[in-house]
Amino acid sequence: MASGNQPTSLEGFARGGVAANAPNAIEVNHIVKKYGDFTAVDDVSFAVKEGEIFGLLGPNGAGKSTLIRMMTTLIPITSGYARIAGHDVAKDPDAARRSIGVIPQALTSDLDLTVQENLSIYAKLYDVPTQRRNAAIEELLELVDLTKWRDAQTKTLSGGMRRRLEIARGLVHRPKIFFLDEPTTGLDPVSRVAVWEMLTNIKSQRQLTILITTHYMDEADRLCNRIAIVDHGKLVALDTPEALKNSVPGSTVIEVQFDNPPADWEQRLHSLADVTSVQPESAGMFRVLTSDGSRTTTQLVEMAVQSAVKLKTLTVQNTTLDDVFVHYTGRQLRDELVKAFSFVMPPRPGLQP
């Protein structure tokens, strides 16, 4: 199990067909980004194998987008270095840019242009020859299931369809490495699943290396070969989803809700045999981690009966990435509140998106 800036073991890399001895597509070494006295990214190191889907998981404001911006040459690195497809992003930014596709969190396609026009303009920016450009657009329209909407203005598309257009646009020049910053934020559950399935399909057909940032646990668990948990600009854990979940003490999670439990109820839950963690939530709800689910379930029921406390709901499940995040950061990802902190970057002439 790896934590901090230590590299992870490559056991379990067979997930998704990634070879443990595959060369590195991305190398990040002791990278730091400072804005005055504020450190947005603090001494982060990791490597991503060719053909891997690598996830940066953390709350809004954790430093994930800043990491992507440095790796994709959009903002300068304060210290450390990043290599993309073997190119140092500070010393050879143009070569790095031509190796990558980037999908930002915001939807940026021109709303007044058609789907095909958006793809065509982007291909021209990357000097894709006309014959290859037309073939690439046809292939991508089919790949993202937008062929029927090729002549539709982008502003008439749904949010999920616009996201599929953005993904197709980022692939039109056949990059080796694909960066996606919060690709399903704002989408409904059905559209999110559709984007996941599409990314998995594209990855298998194009043999891409994908780096994705997300604050959705299910997204990281569903897509990624390995996950790096980022919190307050630091890398706090890195491993496969299975290994991360196995690293949390307590193999079973019990979510239980009581009606008006007494003030010392959390402490009493902690005192139960086999319980390794108790996470209070809201309205009498507790998330209890235990190494013996059956015995703890029985004890919870008996304790409620003996104390005349009504037990409203009880569910048992395996350890999740929510529990991993709590284990390494001390708080729940879904409850994290972050003050907005934005930076307005001046445009850089000649820089392609």
Image (tube, rainbow, N blue to C red):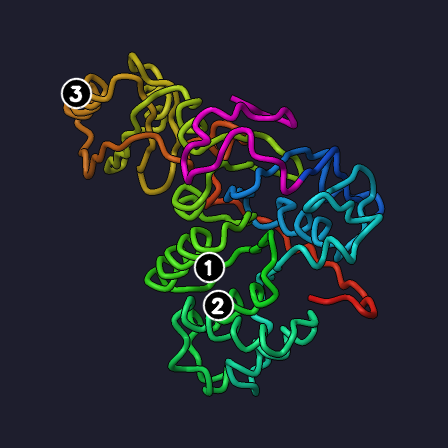
> Which one is nearer the viewer's eye here, 334 or 130?
130
Disc 3 secondary structure class: helix
Q: Are marks 1 and 2 in contact (CB under 8 Å)?
A: yes
User: What segment carries the magenta color?
Assistant: 1-26
Quadrant assignment, res 24:
top right
Q: Is residue 63 left or right of residue 268?
A: right
Residue marked by disc 2: 163
Q: Nearer the viewer, mark 1 or mark 2?
A: 2
Q: Residue 337: image x %, image y %?
A: 55, 48
Quadrant assignment, res 131:
bottom right
Q: Nearer the viewer, mark 2 or mark 3?
A: 2
Q: Are marks 2 and 3 in contact (CB under 8 Å)?
A: no
- Identified at 56% across, 23% down, the residue is 2
Q: Nearer the viewer, mark 1 or mark 3?
A: 1
Q: Specify whether residue 21 is painted magenta.
A: yes
- Identified at 76% across, 63% down, the residue is 344
Extreme front residue here? 131
- Image quadrant containing the C terminus: bottom right
- Identified at 51% across, 37% down, the residue is 227
The span from disc 1 to disc 3 (Cα, nearest Å) is 40 Å
Nearer-N-terminus badge (1/3): 1
Q: Around disc 1, counting alpha carbons within 10 Å, would you say few (fewer than 14), some (14 to 19), or many (20 or more)?
A: many
Q: Where is 90 relative to 108, above or below?
A: above
Q: Where is 125 relative to 267, above or below?
A: below
> Which one is nearer the viewer's eye here, 222 or 311?
222
The span from disc 2 to disc 3 (Cα, nearest Å) is 47 Å
Looking at the rendered structure, the kind of residue marked 3 is Thr
Q: Residue 79: image x %, image y %?
A: 82, 39
Disc 2 secondary structure class: helix
Residue marked by disc 3: 298
Task: Please tell me the numbered disc located at residue 184.
Answer: 1
Q: Are marks 1 and 3 in contact (CB under 8 Å)?
A: no
